[in-house]
Image: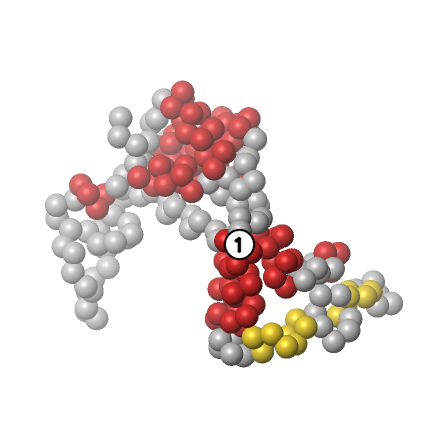
Amino acid sequence: MTIPRCILDAVRNGAPSGERNGRAFWLAAQMRDARMPQSEAIQLLSEFAGNCSPPLPVAEAVSTWTSANREPARDPPSDRRASRSDVVDAPLTWDSVIGPGMVGDAVYGADYSEPLPRPSMGHVDELVTYLEILFEPEDRVSYVLQSFKDEDGKHKPMGKGVYGRTRSEMVADLRRYQAKGMPDLEAIECALGTWDTDAGG
């Protein structure tokens, strides 16, 4: 049996904390729809669990197979681009009709499979992307690490914070600690300072 690429990609990519169970269930449903044997599905779910960050307990990942099989299988997922000969790979014009036979990630009529969830970036990559979208390389970026609670128990910024660093300096520090193999939150703490975790991030 040929395993659809979307399943193999999901197994290889794993999932970050907060998305592991949802993505495991999605994967189990795709394997159910592909009519995969239980032994093969459980093996791939176990592999997926190990590729998660942090790893998902194997029993938890495998339990999604049982949950997914409470519903009947749908049309199997497939790698249609490799098998459709009637698809013309051409750019769309203003007058193009969108429908069956489209190129790319479009849906082909009733033969439907859910799109693969985009793998999340790590915390360092997300922070770098955020900084690069909002600031120019030489812009000074201000941020506050400490807080206090007001009368209502809400956290408020405390002190002047950090205001002398450019975006380029911050990104360079984040990438340097990331390259040393530090976990993301530790790399951010080394690059930017220790923040008040009770106030959120």
Decide if residue 67 is in sight here.
no
Residue 169, how many percent across, how many down? 55, 70
Which image quadrant for residue 43? Answer: top left
**Residue nearest the viewer, comparing 44 with 143:** 143
Residue 124, how many percent across, how many down? 54, 57
Residue at 40%, 39% in the rendered image? 12
**Residue nearest the viewer, comparing 44 with 174:** 174
Residue at 67%, 62% in the rendered image? 193
Q: Residue furthest right?
A: 151
Q: In the figure, 5 relative to 86: above or below?
A: above
Q: In the figure, 117 relative to 59: above or below?
A: below
Q: Amino acid at mark 1?
A: Gln
Q: Quadrant of the C terminus?
A: bottom right
Q: Is residue 199 left or right of residue 31?
A: right
Q: In the figure, 128 relative to 84: above or below?
A: below
Residue 2, how many percent across, how many down? 26, 30
Residue at 16%, 60% in the rendered image? 90
Count of all numbered marks drawn on residues in the image: 1
Q: Is residue 92 left or right of residue 73?
A: left
Which image quadrant for residue 77? Answer: top left
Q: Is residue 159 left or right of residue 105?
A: right
Residue at 53%, 54% in the rendered image? 178
**Residue nearest the viewer, comparing 94 with 89:** 89
> Tag 1: Cα neighbours inside 10 Å, few (<14), some, or many (≥20)?
many
What residue would you read off at disc 1? 178
Q: Residue furthest bottom?
A: 139
Q: In the figure, 192 relative to 118: above or below?
A: below
Q: Is residue 71 left or right of residue 188?
A: left
- Mark 1 lies on a secondary structure that is helix
Residue 117, how many percent across, how many down? 42, 48
Decide if residue 61 is in sight here.
yes
